[in-house]
Image (cartoon, rainbow, N blue to C red):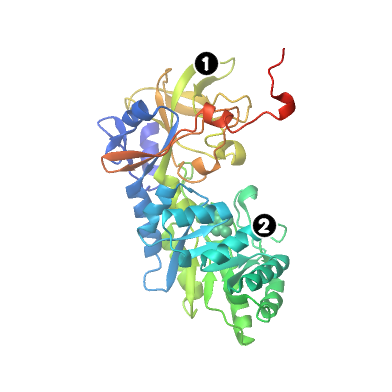
Amino acid sequence: MIQNIRAVTRPRRMDHFQYRDGVLLAEGVSLEAIAEEVGTPFYAYSTATLERHYKVFAGAFDGMDTMVCYSVKANSNIAVVRTLARLGAGADVVSGGELKRALAAGIPADKIVFSGVGKTVRELTDALKAGIMQINVESEPELEALSTIARSLGLEAAVAFRVNPDIDARTHAKISTGKAENKFGIEWTGVHEVYRKATTMAGIRPVGLAVHIGSQLTDTAPFRDAYLRVRDIVAMLRADGLNVERLDLGGGLGISYGDSAGLLPGPAEYGEIVREVFADFDGQLLFEPGRVIAGNAGVLVTRVIYIKEGATRNFAIVDAAMNDLTRPSLYDAFHEIVPAIEADNKAPLLAYDVVGPICETGDTFCIDRKLPALAAGDLLVIRTAGAYGAAMASSYNTRAMVPEVLVREKEFSVIRRRLEVDDLINLEAFPAWLSNNPD
Ligand SMILES: *Cc1c(COP(=O)(O)O)cnc(C)c1O
């Protein structure tokens, strides 16, 4: 009964993690087989899903002058970024480190956009020297700093101004970025003034505006509101004789994590909003999708260490933890969890809290989740973990850093090896006064 209800309401999913003969595959490779070879926990990504998501997203703007700059922070592995680069993707980076990754992955510099509120002199210098397409400036002090650096290098910075449109994205507070009280962007009422001033500054060439109001948006209305505001500002700038050749419309399109009742807006619906607002815009539109490309292209695979029957609950204690996938503890995020070996359809479902070994109560992947009966040694698959998963991982509790595996049809390859505990300890050193062992 429960199974049937699920089958009807489950939103469409465009991924390549499916059961075949009771075994959960990533494309043509069994996750159990990867676990045997790589050990657990690990992340596995599907090349076909990454490619499909990119093409569906880019295809939503067919016939328009657009560029898709994948948001590297969602999943920054160079193999993932290169997979997208091969399809023609540009990159949106938010640090000098990500800039280096994007270049290492093979993204051409002239397809890279640099966003972020706190770019340092070093980062701005590296970006200018690399000759990236555009720097999204988020404050006047940043504009002044960029002008100084560009002048000293004898270069010119193509600049877009990130607008803070004061629009509520209606998403989780920690990933909402477009309200006046958020640290991001220049308040929309002040953008015109800054833009005009920038045209007189040495080393600066204003090219347009940027806007990004948050992540995991499940409603298109805030996009429309923000874009309408940007369109109004463009009209004012152009009426003032100012050059606006590009608009960066950001990322943020939400995805289904398996807990939403109805269908969420997808790239097609989002594309409609963009067409509606910018049909008459004369210039190029950039997009910075992250989650919608990588989210459903990855899973986190973990093994049950113990089943513990608590006083009021059953705990499935697994070998992945909040340091490997932080979204549940950080954002109270829901992730669907399924066994790698499909349970019998008629098997009863039991309620489990799936938890990691870390010494924090927040180290919980789900509470009171109905799952088939579990036993120590079972392999569980945490779905929709391809975005903001490995990229946010740490080694808290001195846990080896989780490896990443990329699957392509029947092949797979380790694209980040496990960073072992010895690797971590070897990064540390004693000062001279502690160099001897205590007596
Ligand atoms: C994080 C971020 C994105 C990507 O957001 P998603 O929700 O993953 O699509 C795009 N642009 C900027 C400026 C960001 O900070």
Local packing at callout 2 (Cα closer than 10 Å; few below 14, some 14-19, many 20+) is some
Q: Residue at x 48, y 17 (%)?
A: 306
For ligand 1, which image quadrant applies?
bottom right
Q: Position of residue 268 (x, y in %)?
A: 41, 62
Q: Nearer the viewer, residue 208 or 262?
A: 208
Q: Position of residue 367 (x, y in %)?
A: 55, 29
Q: Position of residue 334 (x, y in %)?
A: 52, 39
Secondary structure under tag 1 reads strand
Local packing at callout 1 (Cα closer than 10 Å; few below 14, some 14-19, many 20+) is some
**Residue that label 2 marks:** 118
User: Is any atom of residue 366 visible in this view?
Assistant: no
Horizontal arrangement in the rendering, residue 375 relative to residue 188 (left or right): left
**Residue that label 1 marks:** 308
User: Which of disc 2 and disc 1 is earlier in sequence?
Assistant: 2
Secondary structure under tag 2 reads loop
User: What's the CA distance linking mark 1 and mark 2?
Assistant: 45 Å
Q: Which mark is residue 339?
A: none
Q: Quadrant of residue 202?
A: bottom right
Q: Residue at x 47, y 64 (%)?
A: 109
How many discs appear?
2
Q: Nearer the viewer, residue 404 or 425?
A: 425
The amino acid sitting under disc 1 is Lys
Q: Residue at x 52, y 60 (%)?
A: 220
In front: mark 1 or mark 2?
Answer: 2
User: Is any atom of residue 84 visible in this view?
Assistant: yes
Q: In which quadrant is the N terminus drawn?
A: top left
